[in-house]
Image (tube, rainbow, N blue to C red):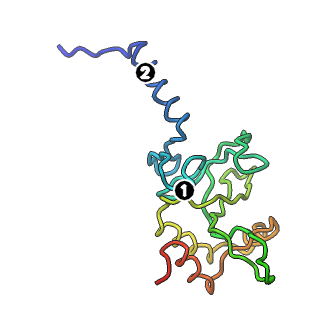
Amino acid sequence: MKHIEEDSEESRRDRKENKNKEKKEGNFRCGYCSELTTSSEYVGTHHRNHCPGCLWSKHVDKDKSGDRQSTCGAMMEPVGITFKQEGSDKYGRVRQGELMIVHVCSNAECEKISINRIAGDDNSQAIINVFEQSELLSDELKKCIKDQGITLVKREEEAQIRTQLFGRI
C-alpha cells in the first residue's frame, strides 16, 4: 500500500520562505517562458523586470522606471529596440545612448508602452530578433510608440546595435 504524504505546515513554510528569499534577492520566474531569472555580477541585473532569455517583462512600474507601483501585473511583450536619449556632446553631436528594449503591455485595457535597460546577461540573439521583428509592427503601434517620444532603431542603424552588443568587428 502506497502512503501519500500530506503537505506539512513546515514544508509549506519552507517553500514560502524560499520564494520570499528569491524575491528579496531580485530573482523571479519569467511569466512567459518560465526561466528562472537571477541577479548577477552583470550590469543591469539587480533591479530588472524582464527575462534575459526571451526579454518579456512584467508590468510592475506605473509612472516611472523602478517605482513598482503598477497594479496591472500583465506580461509586457518586447516589440522593439531604441537608444536611450543621452543629449549632445560639447560639439553639438547627439550622443548615442545605451540600448533599451521597448515593451508593450499585453493587457488590452492597459497597453502601456515602456522602455527598459538591456542587462549584461540578456540574450544577444533575442535582442537582434526583437529588432528584426520590430519592422513588422503595425503602423498604428509604431505611431503609439512614436507618440510616447520613443524612436525605434531602424534597419540602417543595425550596425550600431551589433557594435553595442558584440563590440567593434
Residue at 52% over, 29% down: 20
Residue 147 screen position, x and y as percent: 82, 68
Rendering quarter of residue 81 = bottom right
Residue placed under numbered mark 2 in the picture: 14
Looking at the rendered structure, the kind of residue marked 2 is Asp
- Which residue occupies the foreground of this view, 58 or 22? 22
Tally of marks: 2
- Which residue occupies the foreground of this view, 151 or 111? 151
Q: Seen from this angle, which residue lies furthest left?
A: 1
Q: Secondary structure at mark 2?
A: helix
Task: Between label 2 and label 1, give the one nearer the viewer.
Answer: 1
Q: In the figure, 97 relative to 75: above or below?
A: below
Quadrant for the N terminus, please.
top left
Residue placed under numbered mark 1 in the picture: 43
Residue 59 screen position, x and y as percent: 66, 47
Looking at the rendered structure, the kind of residue marked 1 is Val
Residue 49 screen position, x and y as percent: 60, 49
